[in-house]
Every structure is written in C-alpha cells, then in structure tokens.
Amino acid sequence: CGEFICSKCAKTEHKDHDWNTITSAASLRRRQLKEYLCTIRETNVKEMDKKIQNAAKQTEANQIQCDFEVSKLQKHYDRVISKLNELKMSHEKTMRDNLRSNNFETSKEKVDLEMKKKQVLKLVKFLEERHSTMSDFSLMDNLRNLASLTLIRDCNIQRGGLLLRYREGIIDEGSLEFLMGQTFDLDSIAVEVIEKKSFQYGYKPIYVLEAITEDTYIVGELASEYMYIERVNLRNKEREKLNLNVNGVCVAENGDVYFTNERSKSIERLGTTGSVSTAFSTGPLIPEGICYSNEGGLLVTLRDSERDRYQLGPRSRRLVRHVTPNGDVIREYEYNADGRTRLFIVPYKVRQNFNTDICVVNWTSGDTSELVILTFSGALRSVYRGQDPTKICLLSDVVCDSHCNLLVSDVTYSSIHLLGPDGEFMKFLLTEKEVQHPMSVVLYKSTLWVGDIDGRLAVFNYKS
C-alpha cells in the first residue's frame, strides 16, 4: 500500500499484507539506493523529459488546431456577411428599380396633367370671352369638352405613390447561432460498450447488418461464394434464417425490407408478413449496396459484370441510381460535373445523410477503398481516404448520426472513424481496443452495432 502504519493496523487492516519495520525497510533501501536512484535518473526522468517534450508539442499542435478552427469560423463569417450583402443589395435594387418605374409613370402622368391644365385654362378663357356670342350647340359642346378634360382618371398620384415596402426579418439568438454554426467538444461524442448485448454471432465476416427495430436486426455473413441472411431478435437471441441471396439490405419506412440480389440482378422485397417478391430488375447491371432515400425511393449502387472489376473500360458502368420502389429511374450519379470523370470504381455501400448528401464506400482495389460524398444534386463534396492518405486503408461501411456526422468502419486499422458532415476527420470513435477489423456498422437511435471479420457483433451506446 505504500503507507506508514502503526502496530495495531499491522494486525488488523493490513494483517494479510507484506509489511516491515521502518528500520528494516530503510536498511534494505539503503543497500539498493544507488541502483534505485540510477534507475530513476535513467528511466523515470527520461520518461518525464519525453512527456514534457510531448506536452510542448501538444501545446503547439493545440495552438495550430485552434488557429485552424478560428480561420474556419472567420471564413464562414465572411461568407455569411458576403451573402447578407448580396441579399441587401438585391433588396436595394428591387426597391430602387421599383422607385424608378414608379417615378417614370408618375412623371408621365405629371406631364399629361400639365398639358390638360393648359387646355383647360385655354378653354375656360375662350368660354369667358365668347360664351355670349356662340350658339347653344357650340356652348354645350365646349362645356362637354371641358368636363372631359377636368375628369382625372385613377393614377399613381391618387393611389398614394410608392407601394413597395420592406418588412424586417426576425433576429433572434437561435437563428443567428444556426446561421453561424456551433462549437462542440469532441469528447461529447463517445460510445460505451454494452457487454450484455454483444455476442459471437458466427465465425465468418459479417458483411450485412441492418436494423429493423431496436431489438431486431438483419445479419448476413459470407457463406461460400454468396451471403445469406438471418433475422435476429437480440432480446431473446432467436434467429430466423431467410433463404435469400443478399448483397445489401435496407428497411423502408413501412417496414418492408429491400435487398440486392447479385445472382438474379434484381432488387427484392421482403414484406412485413414474410412474403418475398421481386421489386424490379437491375439487369444487365449487378446491384451491390442499397439504402432508403430521405427524398423517397431507393439509392442502389450498380456495376457491370466485367471480370476485372477494378479495371474500367470505355463501356464500364459504375454508378449510384436513385429509383422509385418499382424501379423507375429518378436520377443517376456516375460522372463528375465535367461529364467525363468517373465518380466510382466499385461503389459498394451507400447511405444518405440527413442533410441529403449521398455517402458511398467506393472500392478502388482489392485492399483499398475511399468514402465519396456527393450532394443530392450530384456535385462532388469530398473524398475521404483515411486519416493518412499515404497509407493503405480499407473502409468497409458508413452510417450517419442525427447531427449529420459520419461513422466509417476501417478494416485495416481496426477502428471507427468519426467524420464531420463534409468528410473532415474529427477523431477515432473506436480503436482496436474495442473492435477488431469491423466489416459493417449500423446505428439505430442511440445503439451502435459493429459486425467484425470474425463473426462477432459488438454493441455500443452512442452519445452525440
């Protein structure tokens, strides 16, 4: 215990401990003092020096990180001010254009009135001087003309002039904070293991993992050349095997399960009653990943059947297709904005973020992959190739949390990467201490499931 104790405590609280008298202990320490102090100097002090150097480096790194975050804030602030200036100038232009148009019409009416005034005065003078000598018909005709000239029709002057008004927007703290973004502590995003729910599902890689409810999941592991899935109830550990050949799975809002079938080149539907039917064919293209779209319908990754899947020819097709549940094509994502540069080599998994971005795990070779993030309109937002792009990295799956952060599984380095909505690395959410070669991930509310290469399902409570 490393404590000074009295003789009474030696017989009670510390009776089973290894203790000695101070005199004996000091005598022993004196004989070992030179060696002990040498060890302190050579080992402990040097270790302290390393930590001091690391602390100094960390202080510098913290300053650099802070400066970088502040620069991001400044750039965003400048963009906000620039956009506000654009809106202000647009409103000003609208009002000044309206003023110009209104004043033009008013000026025309003024000129017309001035001309009418001259005609009226001229006619009044004529009647004053000649009314006694003119015929009754001439008098009545001139009076009719005078009445017509003095009749002023509805005009801008009578309507009250400029009608365009500016209504002020609502300035409140909440809307301003939303506009300016937010600061947050990465430690506030964390996971804790739920040991009671983690278990060994099988002994083969878990490629398919999708939540139906909080306690019911679709799990698929590699069986020979193809994958077959089971519906697993985590509460009672019941497992129902579904004789379906599956590449990817997703659950629609109505509870129907859609899955991709590589063998039949089709999307199939598993109804809530357990019936299976073909939703539509994707032939001649092979479907891989699938997810339910926030905008309705399905997002499906597709590829042609060329033998060397990583060598693309001029006729190769590698894309993400947005379709209705019946297979009608809404949009395809295949090329960058230039219409020539391909977005994908082998699009494997797909998820849609809550901000509508489309996130695609794109395999670039047998042992490397990347995460491609597209806007829903098809613009390339970013490509993530791991924290160190110079190293080989095999990203296998991606899920999105309610704050639009991305959780990406890394098979090579046994970790779960936490990325911001734009694909910027924030931290390692899980490391090899918690997961081993994760192949698939799914997030259902606050429960994070990770399936690994050895058939284990690990369960975590996700806090964000």
Image (spheres, grey):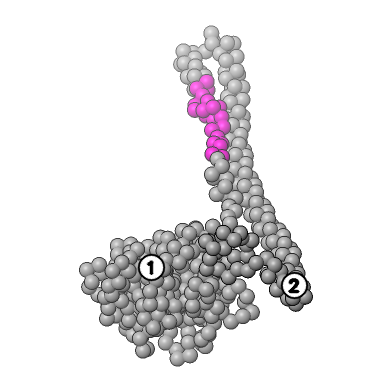
Quarter occupied by residue 224? bottom left
As helix, strand or loop, the secondary structure at mark 2 comes to helix
Crowding at label 1, few (<14), some or many (≥20) Cα neighbours within 10 Å?
few
Q: Residue at x 40, y 80 (%)?
A: 455
Foreground label between 1 and 2: 2
Q: Is residue 448 magenta?
A: no
Image height of 376 relative to 388, above or below: above
Image height of 119 relative to 386, above or below: above
The amino acid type, in three-letter code, at marker 1 is: Lys
Q: CA distance from mark 1 to mark 2?
A: 52 Å
Crowding at label 2, few (<14), some or many (≥20) Cα neighbours within 10 Å?
few
Q: Nearer the viewer, residue 295 or 150?
A: 295
Q: Give coordinates of residue 317: x percent, y percent.
A: 46, 81
Q: Give coordinates of residue 182: x percent, y percent.
A: 58, 52
**Left or right: 262 with respect to 270?**
right
Q: Nearer the viewer, residue 351 or 403?
A: 403
User: What number is the disc on residue 196?
Assistant: 1
Q: Which residue is mark 2?
A: 30
Q: Residue at x 56, y 13 (%)?
A: 127
The amino acid type, in three-letter code, at marker 2 is: Arg
* Magenta residues (range): 149-171
